[in-house]
């Protein structure tokens, strides 16, 4: 019996030493970790822009860091997922440094599509959920999560089409001038062509015209689209009901409908 | 009779009380003071001093009573109680093995979850060994008492 008690005492002491040793060295290793997060870089890509977040982790501790996983999920105010990106580092052994960058590609074509017309016209905010996980010493999984709100500036904020003003052009035609204005709250300059198509209540196209637009970021745009028509058709234009707006750049095309008249 | 009691107190009780006091102070130093010296609260971004003082209170209490009643059935009972209380304490503090904490870092609120299930299992096993050891000690004590022959 006494031998059994002695053996149990020895086992208890060994286990306590193991627990204390692991706890102390683990806390020490965490304190010796060097985590550097660089500045967010915005890079142009073929279908929009890419946000890149460079980071480096120096493991000066006693244990390996495994299965490092950084995930970002961008959702619009309605909760629709706009982007889900994951960066994975399989292992950071002790005494090594890992340089990585987490890239979030923003596909402007999909964001600025018909499904997201309110995002084109109204300022909003995106919710960015950040999850980070790793396996410390392949024994203690650690997870970090946080939420960040990212403001979204609408590229066509306060878009408005003013009243048509008509002036004679020549003996047969008139010149209809349609004022167009908006504020570019987006981080990108807007350069491209704006096409306006006027439709009546029977959905017949009455007139269409194109104008070049250049609206730098955070600036207002106010211009006019000139439409040339026969004199007898001008009443159709002023009484038209629907306006199809198509904006085209080398990177993306957006279109939406507005009530008019 | 009074002289006998005084002798008993001087011979047995006072050394035990002194031993218990020293053992309690030493335990408090190892369990609370040493970790606070090694890892002051300003190093890590969470307030662990409250958890540590609670743990130190439990451990010091059982260290003192364990010394006061060492070699007795009551001492073994306190040994078993200590193991059960420590298991319960770690289970409650780590929320069943997943330690979660919310850290305000500048303007962000970061949720940190650390899965210490393996560590918790090790602590539980140590304390189960302790329970077994105390049970065996109690059985040994009872066996010795029942087999003692009073020849006087």
Image (cartoon, coloured by chain):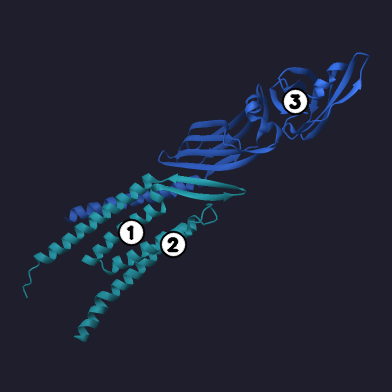
Q: Circle 2 sits on which residue?
A: B53
B42, above or below A90, in the image: below
Q: Chain of mark 2?
A: B
Q: Quadrant of the C terminus of chain A?
A: top right
Chain colored blue? A
Please name whichever residue, B107 or A36, is drawn nearer the observer in this view of the structure.
Answer: B107
**Label 1 Cα crowd, 10 Å radius (few <14 / some 14-19 / many 20+):** some
A24, above or below A139, in the image: below
**Label 3 Cα crowd, 10 Å radius (few <14 / some 14-19 / many 20+):** some
Chain colored cyan? B
Taking the spot 65% from the left edge, 24% from the top edge, the residue there is A109
Taking the spot 18% from the left edge, 53% from the top edge, the residue there is A3
**3 vs 1, front mark:** 3
Residue A233 visible in the displayed image: yes
Q: Circle 3 sits on which residue?
A: A241
Cα distance between the residues tagged 3 and 2: 75 Å
């Amino acid at each position: 019996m006494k031998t059994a008690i002695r053996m149990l005492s020895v086992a208890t002491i060994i286990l306590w030493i193991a627990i204390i040793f692991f706890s102390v060295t683990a806390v020490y290793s965490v304190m010796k970790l060097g985590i550097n997060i660089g500045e967010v870089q915005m890079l142009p890509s073929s279908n929009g822009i890419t946000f890149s977040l460079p980071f480096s982790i120096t493991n000066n501790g006693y244990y390996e860091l495994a299965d490092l996983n950084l995930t970002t999920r961008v959702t619009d105010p309605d909760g629709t997922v706009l982007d889900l990106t994951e960066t994975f580092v399989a292992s950071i052994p002790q005494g090594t440094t890992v340089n990585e960058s987490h890239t979030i590609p923003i596909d402007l074509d999909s964001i600025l599509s018909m499904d997201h017309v309110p995002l084109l016209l109204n300022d909003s905010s995106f919710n960015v959920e950040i999850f980070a996980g790793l396996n410390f010493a392949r024994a203690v999984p650690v997870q970090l999560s946080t939420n960040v709100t990212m403001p979204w500036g609408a590229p066509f904020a306060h878009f408005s089409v003013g009243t048509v003003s008509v002036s004679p052009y020549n003996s047969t035609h008139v010149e209809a001038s349609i004022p167009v204005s908006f504020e570019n709250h987006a981080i990108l300059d807007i350069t491209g062509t704006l096409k306006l198509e006027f439709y009546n209540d029977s959905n017949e196209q009455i007139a269409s015209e194109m104008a070049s637009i250049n609206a730098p970021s955070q600036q207002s745009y106010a211009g006019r689209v000139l439409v040339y028509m026969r004199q007898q058709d001008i009443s159709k234009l002023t009484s038209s009901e629907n306006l199809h707006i198509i904006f085209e750049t080398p990177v993306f095309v957006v279109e939406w409908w507005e009530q008019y008249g | 009779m009074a002289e006998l009691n005084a002798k008993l107190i001087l011979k047995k009780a006072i050394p035990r009380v002194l031993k218990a006091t020293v053992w309690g102070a030493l335990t408090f130093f190892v369990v609370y003071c040493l970790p606070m010296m090694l890892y002051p609260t300003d190093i890590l971004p969470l307030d662990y001093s409250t958890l540590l003082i609670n743990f130190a209170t439990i451990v010091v209490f059982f260290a003192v009573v364990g010394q006061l009643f060492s070699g007795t059935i009551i001492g073994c009972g306190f040994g078993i109680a200590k193991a059960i209380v420590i298991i319960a304490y770690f289970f409650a503090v780590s929320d069943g093995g997943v330690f979660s904490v919310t850290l305000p870092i500048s303007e962000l609120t970061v949720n940190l979850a650390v899965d210490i299930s393996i560590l918790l299992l090790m602590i539980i096993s140590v304390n189960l060994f302790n329970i077994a050891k105390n049970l065996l000690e109690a059985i040994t004590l009872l066996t010795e008492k029942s087999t003692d022959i009073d020849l006087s």
